[in-house]
Amino acid sequence: MASKQQANWSPYDNNGGTCVAIAGSDYCVIAADTRMSSGYNILTRDYSKICRLADKCLMASSGFQADVRALQKVLTARHLIYQHQHNKQMSCPAMGQLLSNTLYYKRFFPYYSFNVLGGLDENGKGCVFTYDAVGSYERVGYSTQGSGSTLIMPVLDNKLKAPSPLILPAKDAVTPLLESEAVDLVKDVFASAVERDIYTGDRLEIVVVKPDGIRREFMELRKD
Amino acid sequence: MRPDPVCSKTLLLRVGFLRRGESPNISSTEFPAKHHRVVCYYRMNLKMDSIDSSPANQALASHVSGSERTLYPYVTGTSVIGIKYKDGILMAADMGGSYGSTLRYKNVGRIKPIGKHSLLGASGEISDFQEILRYLDELVLNDNMWDDGNSLGPKEVHNYLTRVMYNRRNKFNPLWNSLVLGGVKKGQKYLGMVSMIGVHFEDNHIATGFGNHLARPILRDEWHENISFEDGVKLLEKCMRVLLYRDRSAVNKLQIAKITEAGVFISQPYALKTFWGFSAFENPTKGAEGSW
């Protein structure tokens, strides 16, 4: 009697990378490195992990790149349909819910994608949602996902620690920092993560969302 | 057409009976009568995976009846290397098809032109590569049948291949290939890669398999923007020589392919000069008589 065959290939791979998002009072900073790796190889040094889903809503994802790309396509398509049906752009919280539902839809064969959604909510305030691979999510003031997240999160907590969500009256999670200070913090934090995480490096892509538009900038990181 | 319970939406395509070289100039009166045939060719999952196709169900089914899914590759090709150069793309691959550790087939062309603007190189299972060529044949045929002056560029073909590979991986029945897709359209050069699980990216230089480990570092060091044709060929030959020395499944019979705005050119197979005259090889037991 033949025993059950085991697959000798894995449908998943970890292509690495780190994503960060920080929400401010009237801006949102979303950043990710541009390195794509597989095992100990670097596949390319120039791959963007940030996707613009809606006018004021961006998603940065790290993990298995084929799943990330499929997820981005699904969400972009759904946004187009929403625009046709409602004659307006999806708001960031709405996209947040859609992303969560899309991830849970594949609960039993997940998208291996660790996401951070950033943008401006309906009131023009910064808005960051953080996710796990199967769709549990939470609105926060800042977050990081990916291979370097364990190195970065404690530093962000130190600088931006939100007051407890349990105290009354309810206090905002968004940081009081200025936009330039938040961008500097992101640059510092990536420069540190790159030193110790082999999957993070090459180049940093930073996108800043503000009520009047979107700005993109790049910073070189260590390539080793 | 066997109904497919997994697929929630089949893509129906009209296919005309065209021989190679014939142009699809069919008048509107003729077309319905002579060529009317609706055939379903690909059963791609165009919606998200439905619950029926969960891995648990499929795994159970395959255990009972004997799997028809790819478990491991049989006849494989080794690395493909591609670079962007001044006028377009250069690609190199040897002509070997290995059956495990036997170098069984030595005349396997692993670089093929696709449409007017692209070149496809493949490593991995050769039969899956031939299947992919059949899919692409059909894609290009349908593209030509529109007869609207447009033609599929390398970006489009790369995207199509990515979706095909990813969807097969989702059904746990992958096409066991790493594909290199290069081309030029309207002056824009494009070079990308897709792996068997759908990982894809675009870069100035690409290599699959062992090439990733051995050739890519050389390319990172010596490739530069607007490299000339002669320098590009020299660079590819340097990489192929290293692979010949160090990759056991490489054969010394390679083809170099070039694609520019003007068209595709795939060279005749040729061999690289190698050097084995190291003193340690000539007298291998010199330092230790009796050993081997």
Image (cartoon, coloured by chain):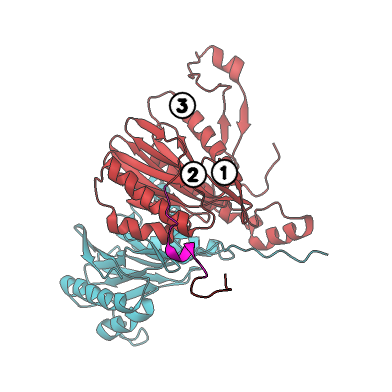
Residue, disc 2: B253
**Which is more N-terminal, label 1 or label 2?**
1
For residue B206, side relative to residue A186 (left or right): right
Q: Which chain is red?
A: B
Mark 1 residue type: Lys
> Which range is magenta?
B273-285
The stretch drawn in magenta includes residue B282:
yes
Mark 3 residue type: Asn
Q: Which chain is cyan?
A: A
Image position of B184 with respect to B53: above or below: above
Image position of B106 with respect to A63: above or below: above
Disc assigned to residue B106: 1
User: In the rendering, at what x and y percent does residue A64 appear?
Assistant: 46, 63
Residue plotted at (37% across, 68% down): A17
Q: Main secondary structure of the magenta part?
A: loop
How crowded pointer 1 is (Cα within 10 Å; few <14, some 14-19, many 20+) is rated as some
Image position of B144 with respect to B206: above or below: above
The one nearer the camera, A95 or B170, is B170
Residue B88 appears in the rendering? yes
Pointers 2 and 3 in contact (CB under 8 A)?
no
Subunit of label 1: B
How crowded pointer 3 is (Cα within 10 Å; few <14, some 14-19, many 20+) is rated as some
Residue plotted at (50% across, 13% down): B27
Subunit of label 3: B
Residue A78 appears in the rendering? no
The one nearer the camera, B108 or A120, is B108
Pointers 2 and 1 in contact (CB under 8 A)?
yes
Mark 2 residue type: Lys
For residue B269, side relative to residue B260 (left or right): right
